[in-house]
Image (spheres, rainbow, N blue to C red):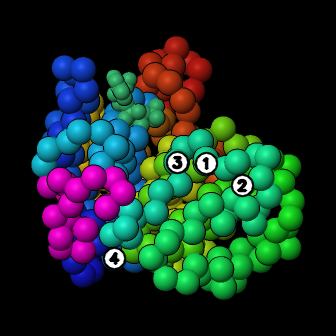
């Protein structure tokens, strides 16, 4: 990674209800472009994001642009410049596009950057009066990401923005993220490895609540043994455009043994 990381997470730990959900997460977010946070279902990706945002009790170190933030409450973290596009997008279906964006304006954060949002996503200007519930999945992601760009944030965190979307819409969301990352560095939680290959410079992989790999995303995705070991993705399905989605659920190597998936 060239330059100091924008976000440096060290030894992050989260205990909820007596259960150790995270115990030793290390993560560097690059100062530009997209950094991917990967891992199988239940590895701890969303909890890591929630811990960075102060939404769950945590210990360890979370430095944003060199400043320790691990003891800050969420509202102060947000003011330090972290924008969050949650897994469910958080778009209000009954409100228009313009109203959804207006809700994200943050008093004291300066003039909202509508010029930037409309430059990156002209569709949001054209559809300003349209109820957000009538937008496509990709357009709703534009709203979710657009909101994070309004307030001059230093970092955007996008949690599984392609989850449940059809392949055509995934491509649309990839363009949305590509455009956003030109303006602001992005931490992308993602299971779609084709998307990660297209967008991410660096990555971290979690397993059972700890970091098990960090490095350039291209190196990991070029190594079928590593993707299978760390992510449970079979050789043929790993990163090809024809198979953009990582197979959900259990390690497909067991399915491969049953002759169901190519390994
Ligand atoms: N509030 C909570 N209370 C108890 N257990 C939790 C809580 N939140 C998460 N967990 C558990 O912690 C583990 C990690 O969950 P998390 O949602 O962070 O994983 P993930 O990698 O984001 O998974 P997915 O890809 O399925 O979204 C899971 O076993 C989950 O059931």
Q: From mark 1 to mark 3, how far is it between C-alphas?
A: 5 Å
**Mark 4 surroundings: few (<14), some (14-19) or many (≥20) residues within 10 A:** many
Q: Nearer the viewer, mark 2 or mark 4?
A: 2
Is 95 rendered above or below residue 40? below
> Mark 2 or mark 4: which comes first in sequence?
4
Label 2 lies in ligand 1 vicinity (Cβ under 8 Å) = no
Q: Which residue is mark 3?
A: 86
Q: Which residue is mark 1?
A: 89
> Which numbered disc covers residue 31?
4
Task: Tell me if 143 is positioned left or right of 247 in this view.
Answer: right
Q: Is residue 8 visible?
A: yes
> Mark 4 or mark 3: which comes first in sequence?
4
**Residue 194, position as x, y percentages in the image:** 56, 54
Is 107 rendered above or below residue 35? below
Label 1 lies in ligand 1 vicinity (Cβ under 8 Å) = no
**Residue 211, position as x, y percentages in the image:** 23, 44
Residue extending farthest to the front is: 107
Q: Which residues are magenta?
A: 61-77
Q: Tag 3's secondary structure?
A: loop
Picture quadrant where residue 100 is located:
bottom right
> Mark 2 or mark 3: which comes first in sequence?
3
Q: Are discs 1 and 3 less than 8 Å apart at CB? A: yes
Q: Which residue is mark 2?
A: 140
Q: From mark 2 to mark 3, how far is it between C-alphas?
A: 12 Å
């Amino acid at each position: 990674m060239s330059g100091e990381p924008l976000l440096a997470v060290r030894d992050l730990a989260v205990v909820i209800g007596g259960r150790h959900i995270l115990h030793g997460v290390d993560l560097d977010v690059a100062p530009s472009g997209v950094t991917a946070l990967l891992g199988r279902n239940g590895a701890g990706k969303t909890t890591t994001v929630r811990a960075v945002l102060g939404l769950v009790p945590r210990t360890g170190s979370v430095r944003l642009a060199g400043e320790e933030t691990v003891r800050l409450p969420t509202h102060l973290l947000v003011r330090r410049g972290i924008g969050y596009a949650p897994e469910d997008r958080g778009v209000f279906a009954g409100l228009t596009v313009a109203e959804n964006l207006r809700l994200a304006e943050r008093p004291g954060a300066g003039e909202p950057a509508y010029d930037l949002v409309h430059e990156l996503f002209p569709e949001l200007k054209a559809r300003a009066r349209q109820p957000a519930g009538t937008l496509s999945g990709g357009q709703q992601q534009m709203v979710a990401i657009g909101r994070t760009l309004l307030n001059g944030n230093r970092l955007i965190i996008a949690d599984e923005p392609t989850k449940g979307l059809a392949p055509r819409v995934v491509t649309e969301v990839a363009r949305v993220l590509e455009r956003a990352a030109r303006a602001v560095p992005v931490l992308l939680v993602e299971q779609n490895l084709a998307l990660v290959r297209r967008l991410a410079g660096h990555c971290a992989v979690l397993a059972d609540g700890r970091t098990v790999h960090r490095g350039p995303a291209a190196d990991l995705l070029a190594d079928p043994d590593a993707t299978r070991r760390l992510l449970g993705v079979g050789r043929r399905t790993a990163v090809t455009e024809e198979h953009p989605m990582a197979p959900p659920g259990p390690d497909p190597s067991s399915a491969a043994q049953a002759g169901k998936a190519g390994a």
